[in-house]
Image (spheres, grey):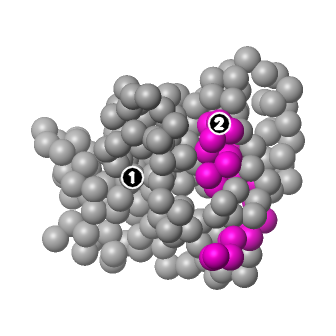
Amino acid sequence: MTEKLIIDMPVIVEGKYDQIKLDSVIQARIIPTRGFGVFTSPDMRDFLIKLSKKTKIIVLTDSDGAGRVIRNHLKSFLPPESMINLYIPDIEGKEKRKKSPSKAGTLGVEGMKPQLLRELFAPYQRGAEQSTDRGGITKAHLYEDGLLGSVDSKAKRYEVAKKLSLPKELSSNAFLDALNMMCSYDEYKELLK
């Protein structure tokens, strides 16, 4: 059995099945939002705000519309510097426990393979050295490279997202955040070739 990665930051997920799946891969404080329950619980909101003042928080939601809505709601009250947004790729399929696939037809966090989740969390495990050469990519770079502001920008972003195993429906801001977490400027330019 593979050892769990120790993550010292709390991790927010959508529901209990996501929590169960992550609990098999990481040792961390995993906080489920109970899906859209985070919208109606002032106690949870207050708790997360207090938590964000003490530590960074990792957010991992499904790549579908509901996951984006939940992530954007969290962004509405959590300081951006306290959030680390991780993204699962768009993988077609259905979770074993469900009778039919999701509306988007893709797997959620609970359907991801453990190895993929390990790779997502590896840079944040205790003792991992965070790469300091990542980042430095700006919206101006995206414009220069045709990933924003041109007729086929969305299609170009989809291609880059696919190469990085990111969901294709990321907003331009989320896309930029993900690029800066995963690539240095030089790696980004290499992706575009």
| Quadrant of the snapshot with the C terminus | bottom left
* Residue named by callout 2: 15
* Residue named by callout 1: 89
Q: Residue at 78% across / 21% down in the picture?
A: 41
Q: Residue at 48% across / 48% down in the picture?
A: 111
Q: Residue at 19% across / 51% down in the picture?
A: 156
Q: Would residue 8 be counted in the magenta stretch?
A: yes
- Whole-number angstrom distance, CA of label 1 to CA of label 2: 18 Å
Given the image, on which type of amino acid does mark 2 rest? Gly
Residue 50 figure quarter:
top right
Q: Nearer the viewer, mark 1 or mark 2?
A: 2
Q: Would residue 67 be counted in the magenta stretch?
A: no
| Quadrant of the snapshot with the N terminus | bottom right
Given the image, on which type of amino acid does mark 1 rest? Pro
Instruction: From the viewer's perspective, tell me whether residue 193 is left or right of residue 34.
Output: left
Disc sitting over residue 144 in the figure: none
Look at the picture and state if 103 lies above or below 177.
above
Q: Residue furthest top?
A: 40
Residue 186 figure quarter:
bottom left
Q: Would residue 152 be visible to someone looking at this image?
A: yes
Look at the picture and state if 80 lies above or below 165.
above
Please state which of residues 180 and 18 is positioned toward the viewer in this rendering: 18
| Magenta range | 1-22
